[in-house]
């Protein structure tokens, strides 16, 4: 009975998480061969195109941090969500990067003339995959971001479970024990070799 539950859990978990596993596999491929993609794209993996310019008339609280100013601008633009914000040129220019898997935006605000420049990142499959691969953590104040972080935790737990359940299923099949042991030893040996050598 235990073995049947283990096998079914192994299988259904794999089916449920197959989009995540495919994304992590393809994104790792894109990162491992980044130079190939860059050569095909003219050497620049990140390209922004201007979406619109506008004047921003909002005022900030005295002593507002770049993050607080960024949040206010994004809220006024209707672009709330995960973001980074920093200032340059002595605080006269604020740059906000609104994170998004498909279309990140860069919003630049210059205090002197109150101008906002909104740019949208050109979609490229390899950049999209790398963004998804690196998207993790509970540092953002948005429930949807936390939900994604929980799904990443689920993938981590599933990987550990697949190793443990695979070992259990291998040991149950007596006819495969010898070849299974050789496979495990070869994998451990190669992994150890890389740890010691690279």
Image (cartoon, rainbow, N blue to C red):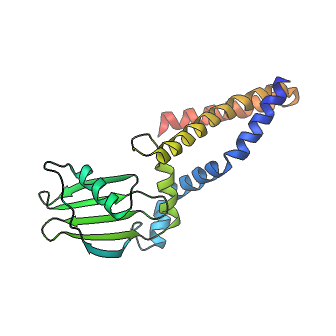
- Using the rendered view, name the quadrant where residue 182 is placed: top right
In depth, the one of 159 and 121 nearer the eye is 121
Can residue 178 be seen in the rendering of this structure? Answer: no
Residue 15: % across, % down: 73, 46
Residue 166: % across, % down: 74, 32
Can residue 145 be seen in the rendering of this structure? Answer: yes
Q: Please, is residue 101 above or below residue 167 in the view?
A: below
Residue found 58% across the figure and 35% down from its top: 191
Considering every residue shown, the one lying at the far right of the view is 175
Residue found 69% across the figure and 28% down from its top: 164
Q: How many marks?
A: 0
In depth, the one of 75 and 35 nearer the eye is 75
Q: Please, is residue 107 above or below residue 21 in the view?
A: below
In depth, the one of 15 and 29 nearer the eye is 15
Residue 141: % across, % down: 39, 44
Residue found 71% across the figure and 40% down from its top: 13
- Using the rendered view, name the quadrant where residue 115 is placed: bottom left
In depth, the one of 162 and 6 nearer the eye is 6
- In the rendered structure, the answer to whether residue 28 lies left or right of residue 173 reads left
Residue 7: % across, % down: 80, 33
- In the rendered structure, the answer to whether residue 153 lies left or right of residue 73 reads right
- In the rendered structure, the answer to whether residue 79 lies left or right of residue 102 reads left
Quarter occupied by the N terminus: top right
């Amino acid at each position: 009975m235990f073995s049947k539950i283990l096998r079914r859990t192994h299988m259904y978990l794999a089916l449920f998480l197959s989009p995540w596993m495919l994304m992590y596999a393809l994104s790792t491929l894109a990162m491992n061969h980044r130079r190939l993609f860059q050569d095909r794209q003219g050497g620049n993996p990140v390209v922004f195109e201007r979406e619109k310019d506008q004047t921003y008339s909002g005022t900030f609280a005295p002593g507002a941090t770049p993050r607080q100013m960024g949040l206010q601008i994004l809220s006024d633009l209707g672009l709330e969500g995960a973001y980074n914000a920093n200032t340059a040129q002595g605080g006269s220019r604020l740059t906000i990067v609104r994170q998004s898997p498909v279309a990140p935006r860069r919003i630049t605000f210059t205090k002197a003339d109150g101008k906002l420049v909104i740019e949208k990142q050109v979609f490229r499959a390899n950049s999209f995959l790398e963004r998804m691969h690196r998207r993790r953590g509970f540092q953002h104040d948005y429930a949807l971001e936390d939900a994604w972080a929980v799904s990443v935790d689920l993938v981590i737990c599933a990987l550990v479970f697949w190793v443990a359940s695979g070992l259990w299923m291998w040991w149950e099949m007596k006819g495969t024990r010898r070849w299974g042991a050789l496979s495990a030893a070869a994998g451990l040996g190669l992994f150890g070799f890389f740890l010691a050598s690279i």
